[in-house]
Structure formats: structure tokens, C-alpha cells
Image (cartoon, grey):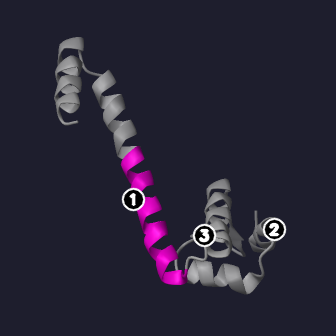
Amino acid sequence: MNHLEYCERLSIVSSTLTIWIDRQWIIPEMTDDDSEFHDADLARGFLILDLTETMGVNHDGIDVIMALVDQVHGLRAKLQALTEAIREQDDDTAQRVVKRLEAMR
């Protein structure tokens, strides 16, 4: 979706989206003539609205929260890669890795 469609879906004004982009809470894909927003950007937008409007979180708080959200997503991707790597191992190796991970709990 483009800039206007994104604002309409979230019921926000363009200047609000500009602030979000400037603060890097939302990072659209840049095309030749416009910004392209995806479903993940929309989900982030709804989260930002919930945090600011429902919970009263200020901009500095949103900075921290969005950084943490990004870290969690990065960790999930790494965990997925680790899981795939373990699945590719022979049974003995995979079981040793799983036991080692379980011992960390």
C-alpha cells in the first residue's frame, strides 16, 4: 500500500506518519515515486497507535519499545535458523544439542 492508503487504514494524518518514519518506527520500502508499506508496517502502526493513544506512551518510550520489538524479531529469526540447522544434523548430534540447550534453562 502507498503512503495515503497506509494513513487511511490507520486513520492517521500524513504528518503523523512522517514523524514515525523520521523516528524509524516505520521503515517503508522506497520505490521510484512513492513509499510502499507492507502488512508488517501496518501491524507496527497499530501497535504504535495502541501504545500512544491507549497507554499514553510518549515518543521516547516508543523508541525503546520499537527497538525491543525489533530485537525480539531478530532473535526469533536466529532461533528459526538454529532450529533448521539442528534438524539438518544427524540424530546423535541433534540430541546432544537439544540436551545442551535444555540444560541452560
Magenta residue check for 51:
no
Q: Position of residue 78 (x, y in %)?
A: 35, 45
Q: Which residue is mark 3?
A: 51
Magenta residue check for 62:
yes
Does 92 sit left or right of 74 as displayed? Answer: left
Q: Which residue is mark 2?
A: 5
Residue 55 found in image quarter:
bottom right
Discs 2/3, front? 3
Discs 3/1, front? 3
Q: Position of residue 77 (x, y in %)?
A: 41, 45
Residue 29 found in image quarter:
bottom right
At 75% from the left and 73% from the top, the residue drawn is 3
- Under mark 3, the amino acid is Leu
Q: Which mark is residue 71?
A: 1
How dense is the environment of label 1, judged by Cα within 10 Å: few (below 14), some, or many (20 and up)? few
Residue 1 vertical placement versus 56 (above, below): above
Does 86 sit left or right of 23 as displayed? Answer: left
Asked if the residue at tag 1 contacts the one at tag 2, i.e. Cβ–Cβ closer than 8 Å, the answer is no
Q: Earlier in the sequence, mark 2 or mark 1?
A: 2
Instruction: Using the numbered discs, state the Cα–Cα distance from disc 2 to disc 3 in whole angstroms.
Output: 22 Å
How dense is the environment of label 2, judged by Cα within 10 Å: few (below 14), some, or many (20 and up)? few
Q: Report the quarter where the C terminus lies.
A: top left
Q: Which residues are magenta?
A: 58-76
Discs 2/1, front? 1
Q: Earlier in the sequence, mark 2 or mark 3?
A: 2
Overall secondary structure of the magenta section: helix
